[in-house]
Amino acid sequence: MLVVRAIQAEDLDALYVMATQVGSGMTTLKPDMKMMGDRLAIAVASFAETIAPEKRDYMFVMEDTDSGRLAGVCAIKGAVGLNEPFYNYRIGTLVHSSRELDVFTRMETLYLSNDLTGSTELCSLFLHPDYRTGNNGKLLSKSRFLFIAQFPHLFTEKLIAEMRGYQEEGGRSPFYEGLGRHFFKMDFDHVDDLTAVGKKSFIAELMPRQPLYVAYLPDDAQQVIGKVHTSTAPARRLLEQEGMYFEGYVDIFDAGPVLQARVSELRAMRDSTLAEIGPATDWDSACAPESVAAEPMLVSNTTLKDFRMILSQSMPVAGAVALPEAEQKLLHCHTGDTVRTLTLNPRKNNG
């Protein structure tokens, strides 16, 4: 069975192995043992509440409890850009007109921006290829929204997620080759590695501050602005289901879209409910009877330090939910404890 849980110090080696399979374009999950170790230490301190909320980095892993193997990872950063610059391009418009020539043009532009500084960020989502089946991807991605719904006071009002930008099959980034290379004079992977370890001062030093006209870029670079990597498209759809949307900000290197939302407007904030675990007398199997199972439910405990979440077929009724013994064990819960529940998929009448 699969459970999404707070990361632990002993997960470091397995996390490193997983990071080796991610590839370029995800700066928050690089196969660097020191970087991974430092980040994991911050994550453990975050769940223990021994550092300030804005400095926290909540990392979650998906564990296959049958084998003990890590199947995936995801994270929530309390706030970005407070200790190091956080850059994006904001897509804008400049208008040029001449009455004498009867010419009126609208030109799309890119502005180097720090507008999203201080936002809470969803990041580091990666599901091992062996587990990319069924509802596993949804379980991993949406676990973060249930965590936010349970502990909204720990996060800022604005939530963002940088999506991995489009790359060709060979790893070439059309946007970077059409723009960034002219200023940085290095390969995309090298730039990616520098930003992963926090070396971002070169961005301000080398990138122009004036607006950049999109029309001056090569056609293939223009066409991928706001376009996600092929493998990232499903992740984007899941975030949009939960209330996130694209509002004109893109990554400065690969032009991947930055999705955003107000925490108060997330589906999990609106629709998730608390329920008490009822007697499990008639729920000895890991799956509910087919007559009771209506739709998959995300179910989490309500403990910050030992947060755990599963996918269940048990539906809450009148403020109570009957969870099988096996599921209670996965959640480290018992009869009478409170859990938070949310339908895996948005109901049609909720958009």
Image: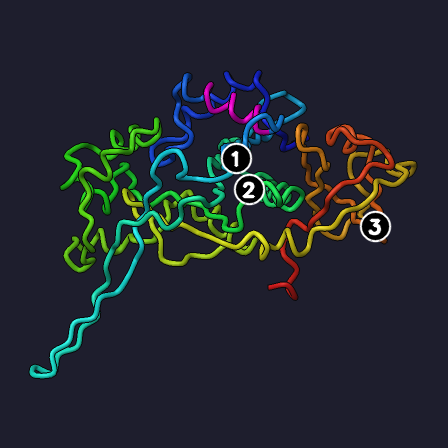
Q: Is residue 291 left or right of residue 10?
A: right
Q: Are marks 3 and 2 in contact (CB under 8 Å)?
A: no
Which residue occupies the foreground of this view, 208 or 337? 208
Label ID, residue 141: 2
- 266 or 297: which is nearer to us? 266
Q: Find numbered disc 2 in the image and state the secondary structure of the residue it sits on.
A: helix
Identify the secondary structure beneath mark 3.
loop
Which of the two discs, 1 and 2, labels the residue nearer the N terminus?
1
> Outermost residue, left direction?
100
Provide residue 247's location: percent of width, then percent of height.
40, 58
Q: Earlier in the sequence, mark 3 or mark 2?
A: 2
> Is residue 93 highlighted in magenta?
no
Q: Position of residue 162 (x, y in %)?
A: 41, 45
User: Foreground residue, 14 or 84?
Assistant: 84
* Disc 1 + disc 2, Cβ < 8 Å: yes
Q: Which residue is tagged 1?
A: 74
**Does 140 sit above or below residue 198?**
below
In terms of image quadrants, where is residue 215? bottom left
Label 1 – label 2 distance at C-alpha:
7 Å
Q: CA distance from mark 3 to mark 2?
A: 25 Å
Disc 3: which residue = 319
Disc 1 marks a residue whose amino acid type is: Cys
- Residue under the point 30% across and 50% down: 89
- Badge 1 marks a residue whose secondary structure is strand
